[in-house]
Amino acid sequence: MEELQLATRNHGMPLEALRFPITPVGLHYLLIHYDIPTIDPSTWTLRVNGCVDQPLELSLPDLQAMPVATRVLTMECAGNGRALLDPRPASQPWLVEAVGTGEWTGVELDHVLAQAGVRTDAVEVLLTGADRGVEGGVEQAYQRSLTVEVATSAGVLLAYELNGAPLPPQHGFPLRAVVPGWYGMTNVKWLTAVTVLDGPFDGYQHTAAYRFRRDDDDPGEPLSRMVPRSLMVPPGIPDFFTRARTARAGRCELTGRAWSGSAPIVSVEVSTDGGETWHPAELDAVAGGVGRWQAWRYQWDAEPGDHQLCCRATDGAGNRQPLEPEWNRGGYTNNSVHRVPVRVVE
Ligand SMILES: Nc1nc2c(c(=O)[nH]1)N[C@H]1C(S)=C(S)[C@@H](COP(=O)(O)O)O[C@H]1N2
Ligand SMILES: [Mo]
């Protein structure tokens, strides 16, 4: 029941929505650890404080008067693929659809930090959301930090628009961070404060959550950039309850998208026999980029029978999706190849 409770609050992107280069807002995946906070935009401000020369308190119009930047970026939850691990780590039970691509508009975090003047003793930049909850027995506001280097040179946006409209409540109204190429947890929603710290942040979302830990004793490695993944639009038609798919024999174009947070995608391969043999897919002329998905297609001559379709991506840094996942306690970064069983009929 607890997994169902999370699954109904936090929805994924239906895979057929891979056809949209920019995900319509209502189809973008959603992950909200606690509750959507109530925010009155007329009194809301962003505090910029800590190790800065000039602390700031900025209203939404103040932020909107600053230089505007727009970026198309793919966002993926670090737990995407979790529920495919065995045993299944109990948490938000994502299969593979915790992803979406948005056109984010706002002001560069670097611009705001420059206005405040980051002092030389600065080490990290802490982002605090307005939402509160309890996790692992610890009451907390949702907080994540970035190194000063990432905060000032990685193209981080403080976004107030998604796809040309004000952020909707569920995606962080009135302001959220968007960090190109990083997993979803970094993109703090409902921002209330940007605090420059003179030491590393040791809050729950860094020390307990979002670490790749092989077992209970493993302190683990912090998660950062998205590892490569490709997904396909499942062909044919689904059964309502089982979602088992049936397609017609003949020429069938398989399409999908692939992304990585470290380097552009350089190849996508397709297998129609469960990963025994692989064939190159064609990458669309419109290039993706670091943290922005890339469309691909493959012409499949579908013969009657049962097939397991698979796709796998490789990025320019040489990272390729594995056939099998590596289990870990939090169920993170399972980017093993996407598998879609299909029955082909005459
Ligand atoms: N304040 C706040 N920010 C947050 C979260 C949250 O619960 N609270 N969830 C994070 C996680 S784990 C993910 S995957 C993304 C999801 O963003 P989306 O719901 O806009 O797709 O937001 C991140 N930012
Ligand atoms: Mo996430």
Image (spheres, grey):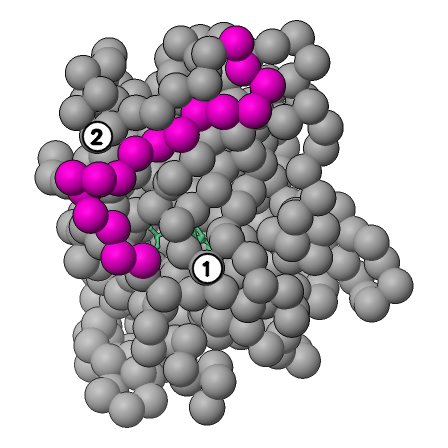
Q: Check disc 1 and report its element: helix, strand or loop.
A: strand
Hey, what amino acid is under mark 1? Arg
Q: Is residue 298 visible?
A: no
Quarter location, residue 319: top right
Q: Which residue is mark 2?
A: 60
The residue sitting at 71% across, 64% down in the picture is 328
Report the span colored magenta. Answer: 37-53
Q: Point out which mark residue 320 bears.
A: none
Q: Check disc 2 and report its element: helix, strand or loop.
A: helix
Left or right: where does residue 107 sit relative to residue 196? left
The residues tagged by marks 2 and 1 sit, at their Cα atoms, a distance apart of 22 Å
Numbered marks: total: 2
- Residue 331 position within the rendered picture, expressed as x and y whole percent measured from the top left: 62, 65
- Residue 295 position within the rendered picture, expressed as x and y whole percent measured from the top left: 30, 40
Q: Is residue 119 visible?
A: yes
Which one is earlier in the sequence, the residue at label 2 or at label 1?
2
The residue sitting at 49% across, 37% down in the picture is 127
| Quadrant (top left/top right/bottom left/bottom right) for the C terminus | bottom left
Left or right: where does residue 277 sit relative to residue 231? right
Hey, what amino acid is under mark 2? Leu
Q: Residues within 10 Å of mark 2 (few under 14, many from 20)?
A: some
Looking at the image, is 58 positioned above or below residue 337?
Answer: above
Q: Residue furthest left?
A: 165
SS assignment for the magenta stretch, majority: loop
Looking at the image, is 121 positioned above or below residue 302?
Answer: above
The residue sitting at 44% across, 25% down in the picture is 48
The residue sitting at 65% across, 69% down in the picture is 136
Q: Which residue is mark 1?
A: 132
- Residue 194 position within the rendered picture, expressed as x and y whole percent measured from the top left: 47, 30
- Residue 337 position within the rendered picture, expressed as x and y whole percent measured from the top left: 53, 58
